[in-house]
Image (spheres, rainbow, N blue to C red):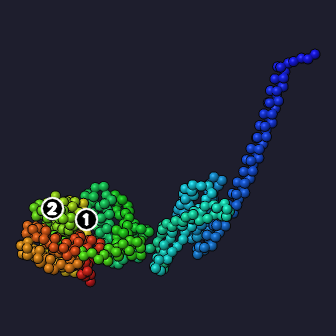
Amino acid sequence: MHTHNPAKKRYNRTAKQLILLFLFTCLGLSLFGTRLFLRATNDHILRNTRQQAFDQLVQKEKKNQPLTSLKSIHTGSKKMNPYGFFYSEEESDAVVAQLEKQTQAAAQQLETISSAVISYISEEAIAETLIHRNFVTKEYHWAPEQAAFVLAQEAYELFELRSYETREPLTFKEAAKDETSLRSITRCLQEALLEAHDSPETILEEVLTLPDLTFEEEVVVLPHALKLRTDPLVFGFETIDLAYTDLFPAINPLLLDPEFIEEQEKKKNDATKKVALTFDDGPNTQSTMRLLHILEQEQVEATFFVLGQMVTAHPAAAAAIVEQGHEIANHSYSHPDLTRLSNEAIRNEVKKTDEAIFRTTGVLPQTFRAPYGAVTQDVIKQVGLPMIHWEVDSLDWQLRDPQAISSKVLAEVRPGSIILMHDIHESSIDAVPAILSGLREKGYEFVTITTLLSEEQQPYHQYFSATSIQKIE
Ligand code: NI
């Protein structure tokens, strides 16, 4: 009998399919498992290879260092790239902690997982005077073909300066250029305190009566700045940093970036014919404002040696001088002959004018001109600012004739001249357009006093032109 049961047949076929499916699944899973296993083994081998290569690298880097008794720490994990750092046993805990922090940070920044970081402290002697201590961070990338780490980039960060002779941190005296520097650095400190304070007017008196710094002062010589202690009860902060570039030229030149020195040399050797127009005894609301208008139209920068009492009487004119980009400088408060005053009275003339100028313009003057040009060594010491005289006297106060004034100036000017005029006489202002066009025809450029002196003006020095300079004894 031939029976035909299509249901049973279908059943058998379904069972076979299920068994096949099961077998394939098993096969697939085992293949996948093997691959995983193989990959894990490969990873393990590679990790060991890399770890060995890394250890060798650290040993090699250590050998290149002149430092003795080096300690090293290596770390890293499956997820992290290996990193390591080494240092001399003499290093302070703080330095080691900072080195570790920097190394970790560099390792965390690596993008690929096949990189490594090695850090250490290197020392570099500068002119057999000071030692630069750097954190060196080297990043290596794994090169599979060579089975080795290859240097990808290295960074040097200057973190400490030491004396070459003593190996001690640099002292304030070693960081300063000379004794004269103390006065300049004090002036920079005054400026920095006013700049850092929220309401500088409230500390102006204390700032302007700050005694000059001494080399006994507790000063930390940082890589790029001096850290000075200040009275927190008076100024609101305990320390303040003065950048070396702001302290130039009162700072040991070795502390300055060679690029900065190069730029400075370029400025000094610039062959452009420069002159500085200076205007004394103002400001006022008539002739000074008329002069400012002419200078603005001609796009000329000048320097105004103002009287404190005139600034107090005409604050808007003083503010306009600074707003238009001119230099404002100190010419005493009431125009006395300083050689006839007591030391205290001299200092008071300077201080009261600084105060008036700062309150109206927010600027602390950088230079001083004595009334009548009358100085003694003692006056120059008491004033404590670079003393600016002149080379070309327009005699405008006497001539009172625009034609005569401009002719005299044009006949006497040389490159680097400082020209003396007064912005309180209308005839002086009338002479200005002819002076400007006449000097321009001869190829002159007009600059401020500090630009003319390449910002190298110093206290206890007298300046008659860019090149005629006298230091007091
Ligand atoms: Ni004067």
Residue at point 62%, 70% (across, down): 62
Q: Is mark 1 within 8 Å of ligand 1?
A: no
Crowdedness near tag 1: few (<14), some (14–19) or many (≥20) residues, C-alpha within 10 Å? many
Q: Is residue 143 left or right of residue 381?
A: right
Q: Earlier in the sequence, mark 2 or mark 1?
A: 2
Task: Say above or below: 127 vs 429.
Answer: below
Where's residue 50, x and y in %?
67, 60
Please tell me whether mark 2 sits on a helix, a strand or a loop: helix
**441 left or right, relative to 78:** left
Please name whichever residue, 245 or 138, is drawn nearer the observer in this view of the structure: 138
Q: Quadrant of the C terminus?
A: bottom left
Q: What residue is pinned by disc 1?
A: 364
The answer to whether one can see residue 5 in this image is yes
Task: Determine which residue is flagged by label 2.
Answer: 293
Q: Nearer the viewer, residue 315 or 426?
A: 426
Hey, which residue is sitting farthest top in the picture?
A: 1
Residue at x-position 60% and y-position 63%: 140
Query: Where's residue 34, x and y in %?
Result: 77, 47
